Amino acid sequence: MASEELKDKKRKSSSNEEDLEIKKKLKKDKKDKKDKKDKKDKKDKKEKKDKKEKKSKDKSEETQTPVDSNSSTTNSISTSSSSSSDQYAESSELSSLPQSDIDQFFKENDVTVEDPKSKNLRPILSFNQVQFDSKIQSEISKFPKPTPIQSVSWPYLLNGRDVIGVAETGSGKTFAFGVPAINNILEHKSKGIKVLAVSPTRELASQIYDNLKKLTDLSGLNIVCLYGGVPKEQQRKDLKKADVVIATPGRLIDLMNEGCVDLSKVQYLTLDEADRMLEKGFEEDIKNIMRQSANPSRQTLMFTATWPKEVREIAQAFMNEPVKVSIGNRDELSANKRITQIVEVVDNFGKEQKLLSLLKKYQSGEKAQDKVLIFALYKKEAARIERLLQNKGFKVSSIHGDLSQQQRTQSLEDFKKSKTSLLLATDVAARGLDIPNVKTVINLTFPLTVEDYVHRIGRTGRAGQYGTAHTLFTEQEKHLSGALINVLKGANQPVPDELLKFGTHTKKKEHGAYGAFFKDVDMTKKPKKITFD
Ligand SMILES: Nc1ncnc2c1ncn2[C@@H]1O[C@H](COP(=O)(O)OP(=O)(O)OP(=O)(O)O)[C@@H](O)[C@H]1O
């Protein structure tokens, strides 16, 4: 590899990975737009045709009544399968349930299953209806019952299938992919990395690691977490005996280039926050990882709360006849309905004063200890607001790309353990972080996409709880008003008149423009000084 390229790789893994991605993307974006459009027009035509053909094929194959018109899900008992890796036998308890119970579950949870093989596996409605390894079983059974995404995706994962799992923020997706993966590798105790989960940020990788470590510790498996910003030595050592690897792409590729990672035995490859991982910034890295882990029996899993059209085709290229499991209507971008969403249209200059009054509202009196998470867009903005809040006497910690990994980890720990009740973050913390009892999310500056908005506000209202998201929206973001209005309406939230004035038109996104790092800002102005997280 050329030395410049190598330097670039190293820099990427040890500094903020995303900084480089935005620079790459901005360059590519313009050029790609036209190609993309031509390709898309072609693709749309083809998709339409395929869909039509598939629909008529599905109809002729179906032997039972689908739950809804989008779904090829039926609720038969799984007795046989053509898959050689199929080891899943439905429990007799599940088999004996009346069909009406299954129908009711699908209806109540608004479940859609799109399965090109029409396997129609019944969802696992209670822990008694599945037999994981006894230690894993007792750990997971501490919860009252599987969450819907776990219920529906587990049978397919145990059946050896590739799965795309789309469910709202905070709905237990980590165990949805983690439990069957770890359970299944217990049966084949060969050496080497058998489970690989890739996630977009260090904090999220570390959280997945903490969750799955509970399971691997119980099972005598070794797990390692690879991310940048910390020395590599320990990671290299741990890799030698690792069965399970959780990683951010930058550090993983870095260690792959050093020859420290052998992915040839990977049985389960999961992309968490899959849509983010398939964006242009990460796409090349993901292709590289997929190539290196091209074990023919590999199962590929993609889990996310948002699944925009722009990434669906790319996902297919990495997967083998995946089953798509959606909880709630995830084809339309939608937010968790337990979150009260308040959107205020404000003047850019008044935002700081507004923030102070919001903190009074959400953190005074008996709410003084309530956890509030504030999102800024750029790290410079986050640093400025942090100083402002400190000057005003607030005890605030922060997470953004200008901080060392140690500082980032410490801030998150303090907030998780309620040592601080105010956390200021950039979109580095938008996705996936599971922080207990965040009561309020304040969007001081609107994110670059409405998908990111859904992820940001999803830091509250997790695991069945309720929360509030208070968003300051300015004229600068008016190109996102239509998509935001749709999200508000979809969750039965009020739409302020001031927002409606910006229009309800939704701008179509390009694949390259999707994600936390694109904005219609004037990039001709001193582009080098624009910093992103
Ligand atoms: N079966 C279950 N019952 C109740 N809680 C559960 C269950 N499974 C997982 N949880 C808990 O739910 C919380 C959210 O889970 P998790 O972080 O996996 O959500 P997620 O769907 O990945 O969210 P995001 O989209 O934001 O990444 C965690 O605290 C987890 O321990």
Image: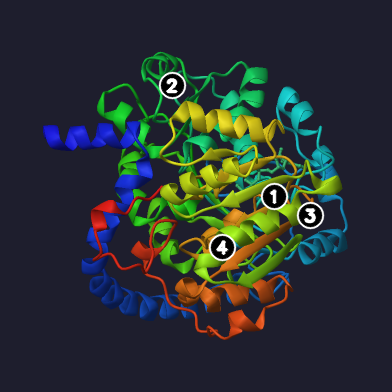
Mark 1 crowd level (few <14, some 14–19, many ≥20, 10 Å Cα): many
Distance, label 3 to label 1, CA atoms, is 13 Å
Q: Identify residue type, mark 3.
A: Tyr
The residue under the point 55% across, 84% down is 504
The residue that mark 4 highlights is: 351
- Ligand 1, seen in the image, is in the quarter at top right
Q: Looking at the image, is 233 positioned above or below residue 164?
A: above
Q: Determine the secondary structure under disc 3.
A: loop
Indicate the colouring scheme. Answer: rainbow
Q: In the image shown, does 475 or 243 lie closer to the viewer?
A: 475
Q: Looking at the image, is 511 positioned above or below residue 376?
A: below
Sequence-wise, the earlier of marks 1 and 4 is 1
Count of numbered marks = 4
Mark 2 crowd level (few <14, some 14–19, many ≥20, 10 Å Cα): some
Q: Is residue 321 visible?
A: yes
Percent position of residue 84, x then y: 52, 41
Q: Determine the secondary structure under disc 2.
A: loop
Q: In the image shown, does 148 or 9 lie closer to the viewer?
A: 9
Q: Determine the secondary structure under disc 1.
A: loop
Sequence-wise, the earlier of marks 3 and 4 is 4
Q: Identify residue type, mark 2.
A: Gly
Q: Looking at the image, is 283 positioned above or below residue 326?
A: above
Does residue 373 appear to the left or right of 451 in the view shown?
right
